[in-house]
Amino acid sequence: MSELHLPPDDAELLHRLQRIVEVVDPVPADVVEVGRAVFALRDPHLTRLEVVSLPAELSAVRSSTGSSRLHFFEHGSVSIDVEVTVQEPFARVLGAVVDTVDDDLSGCRVAVETADSSTTVDLEQGRFSFGRVPLGLARLVLERGGHREMSTAWFEIG
Amino acid sequence: MPEPRTLTDLVTAAAEGERAAWNEIVERFSSLLWSVARAHRLGQDDAADVVQNTWLRLVDHLDSIRQPEALAGWLATTARYESLSMLRRRGRDVPVRDDDLAPNVADPAALALDAAMLDDERDGRLWQCFAQLPARCQRLLRVLMAVDRPNYASVSEALGLPVGSIGPTRMRCLTTLRTLVDDCEYVFERRGRSS
């Protein structure tokens, strides 16, 4: 990749500004620590449900109760449809799981996980609902037979 | 001292589950992510969330990063996207072009606090002048400061600026900064100043 070649005057001025920023606005140590901790959320054993892209006009839904956003995920025969409705400062998350091959979803559970929280509910006739999900990034994890089996990518609640 | 590992080695090792490699990536790029978030004028808490979200996205993509040497650009783009999402969530408009280019009205109280942290009074004045630069200039210069060896691709991706406009914009921004500094009757010693 081509590097920027700064004239010495510019480089020196930027270097001086950088030293100022390091004093007045350094990266807080806890921000770095949180970054390190994110590694614990990596779970390579989970099968990834990929995002199914939709045109923006189809993923936003407006109704009398506010606006919602739809997200679709799938892998093989399994798909999860999610509707997120913001109700500040939380969101309501409704969804449905479908497996076109193994349609017996009894005993399945779904967890909504954020970087620092996790809530699990039972699937009821393929549907699930979470009432107070914090705004920000979250992922859904599908549990089958007591095992964490699949997860969505991190997606935006809000 | 052992040679620092290349990004390719670090990404491969982290994807295989090596925590130390992940930590090294986090330590190397946190200042870039923080700069991108702060350059979008996010407060400390929101900027911290942006940095965390960017790491969450990376941990999801570790296995699929094909060009680890382009990681800085990938991270900067993701941090920018997360910053814009945060602004939208907070109900704040993303600056439109006209506002973006207007001189900035800095918060005098915040600047006074910043200046109190700096030993050199001239640095305080320089920082005051920096705060008056248009938002677009502040974003560009903050990102340029944060990358060790700035390259056009990563800076372009971090800011959504066309590659061809980075050089001319940087020149204009630094010229404006020098003019502001001169207006403050502060003579920036361009050469020969030891740090």
Image (tube, coloured by chain):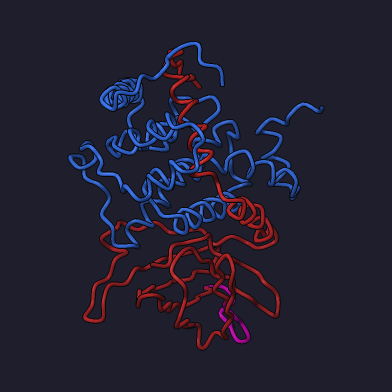
Chain colours: A red, B blue
Query: Is residue B128 positioned above or below B52 on the image?
Result: above
B78 or B16, which is in the foreground? B78
Magenta-highlighted residues = A100-110
Task: Check the image and report above or below for A123 versus B4.
Answer: below
Residue A128 placed where, x, y %?
49, 82
| Quarter of the image where one finds residue A44 | bottom right
Is residue B164 visible from the viewing direction of this image? no
Which of these two is toward me, B64 or B55? B55
Q: Quadrant of residue A63?
A: bottom left
Rendered view: A4 above or below B25: above
In which quadrant of the rendered image does the C terminus of chain A lie? bottom left
Give the residue drawn at x 56%, y 79%.
A103
Is B184 magenta? The answer is no
The mark total stands at 0
Residue B23: image location, x then y, percent: 69, 46
Residue A1 in view: yes
Residue A109 is inside the magenta segment: yes
